[in-house]
Image (spheres, rainbow, N blue to C red):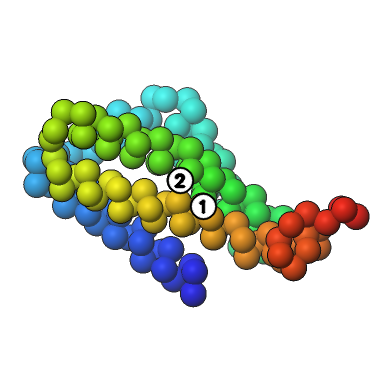
Amino acid sequence: MYLTQFAFEEAKHTQVFRMWLDSVGVTGDLHGYLDDLPSYRQMFYDELPECLSALTTDPSPAAQVRASVTYNHIVEGMLALTGYYAWHKICVERGILPGMQRLVRHISDDERRHMAWGPSPAGAMSPRTTPTGRCSKSG
C-alpha cells in the first residue's frame, strides 16, 4: 500500500512542477543546468540507478535498505527537502508566489512521510533488526 501511495505522490509532484514550468514559459530541456555538476551526475546517473536496478537481481533486505536510504534519505531527505526549504523561504521573505508556497509546503510534507515510512518495510525485514525495526544487540 505504501509503495502505491508513494508512486502516486511522486507522479503528482512531477505533474505539478511540469504544469508550473509550462505556465511560466519554461518548456526547454533543463538537463544542461545540472549535467556538468559531478556530484549530480554521480547521484542521479550512477548511485541511484545502480542501487534501484540491483533490486531486480538482489531483492534481499540489505539491497532494499540501500535503495530506500539512497532515494528516501539522500535524494528526498537531503537534496529535495533542502531545495524546497530554500525555495519556500525565498518566496515567503519576498512575499511572492503564494500558491507555490503552499505547493512546496504540501510536497515537503509528502517527502517527510516518504522518509519516515520508506525505509521501514526493508528495515523491519532485516534479520539484524527486531520486529519494531530497531537494531538488535546480537547484530
SS at mark 2 in the image:
helix
Q: Nearer the viewer, mark 2 or mark 1?
A: 1
Determine whether, in the image, residue 76 is placed left or right of residue 68: left
Identify which residue, 53 or 25, lies in the foreground: 25
Is residue 48 visible from the viewing direction of this image? no
Q: CA distance from mark 2 to mark 1?
A: 7 Å
Q: Residue at x 23, y 39 (%)?
A: 29
Q: Nearer the viewer, residue 128 or 31?
A: 128
Q: Nearest the camera: 50 or 126?
A: 126
Confirm or deny contact between disc 2 and disc 1 (CB under 8 A). yes
Q: Which residue has dot 1 on it?
A: 115
Name above or below for residue 79 compared with residue 69: above
Determine whether 73 is above or below 36 in the image.
below
Q: Quadrant of residue 125?
A: bottom right
Q: Which residue is mark 2?
A: 76
Give residue 88's position: percent from left, percent from top: 27, 37
Residue at (33, 39) in percent of width and height: 84
Residue 139 lies left or right of residue 69; in this view the side is right
Can the viewer see residue 116 in this picture?
yes
* Position in image of residue 121 (x %, y %): 62, 65
- Residue 6 in which image quadrant: bottom left
* Secondary structure of residue under mark 1: helix
Q: Which mark is residue 86?
A: none
| Mark 1 nearby-residue class (10 Å; few <14, some 14–19, many ≥20) | many
Tag 1: residue type? Met
Report x, y in % for residue 69. Answer: 59, 48
Which residue shows up at 64% across the image and 50% down it? 66
Tell me the residue at 42%/25% (across/down).
Answer: 37
The amino acid beneath tag 2 is: Glu
